[in-house]
Amino acid sequence: MDSLDEVRAEKRIEIFEELVSPVMSSIGLNNWNGKYLWFSDFNSEGIKFVVEYQVFKGFGGSFAFGICYENVPTVSNWKKLVNHKTDKSTKIHYYKRLEGWQASYDGTDRTSGRDIVSHWNEVDFRKTLFTILESLPSRLEPWFKARSNRDQNILELQNEIKGNTEFVRRIVNPDYILCFLNAEKGDLEKSKVHFSKYFDEKLAISKEFEPMQELISKRIEKLTLTQ
């Protein structure tokens, strides 16, 4: 094993500018926050594609990817809506991990190091990063293309709920997202179905979610009126 000389944040960012940003630009993610986030502009349906590098405890990291929705706010402390319409506020709502990282997270592959960037030293960092970047466009472009409009996102989020319980445990629950996407589409009945499902589960845990429920209800009503 090569000697330990951990690649610190400043050096990681320098290498990201050199190696990662050009790859992201090649798939339409032309914006970079100067740290760990690359993203497209919103398209005509309020969909922004995002890739985020996430640092692990220890000497490694990997890439998450997904979608930021222009009209899907998140909630701070159950009482305040936070919008994600600007570059600075960009957030992954529909969140996925690279397959190798997901397999490691699930416990099905914790030894291969697939899709994991080593921070052990600069040589290992560049080597493992480059290995991921070589295949990243061919892996991410089809995923983004299949979710480039609202109807595609509604379908894929419904499929995630049916087939992937791990996804359902995300901070941004798919039922929560679907409240807004269906309201955007003008389908208030389906929006209400997902709204009820989401908040029935939350309120069963704690009545402290009631202020959040009211906030979201008002925002969805406002969104529906603007369509």
Image (cartoon, rainbow, N blue to C red):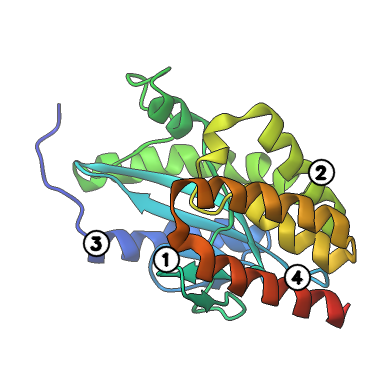
- The first of marks 1 and 3 along the sequence is 3
Judge the density around disc 2: few (<14), some (14-19), many (≥20) Cα neighbours within 10 Å. Answer: few
- Which residue does the image show at 65% across and 45% down from the upper left? 140
| Front: mark 3 or 4 | 4
Residue bearing the label numbered 2: 155
- Residue at the (35%, 39%) spot, across then down: 127
Q: Secondary structure at mark 2?
A: helix
Q: Which residue position holds label 3?
A: 9
Q: Residue at x 85, y 80 (%)?
A: 225
Q: CA distance from mark 3 to mark 4?
A: 32 Å
The disc labelled 4 sits on which kind of residue?
A: Gly
Residue pointed to by mark 1: 17
* Circle nearer the N terminus (4, 1): 1
Q: Nearer the viewer, residue 35 or 164?
A: 164
Q: Of circles 1 and 3, which is in front?
A: 3
Pointers 4 and 1 in contact (CB under 8 A)?
A: no
Tell me the quadrant of the picture where the N terminus can be found.
top left
Residue 20 appears in the rendering: yes
Q: Nearer the viewer, residue 111 or 159?
A: 159
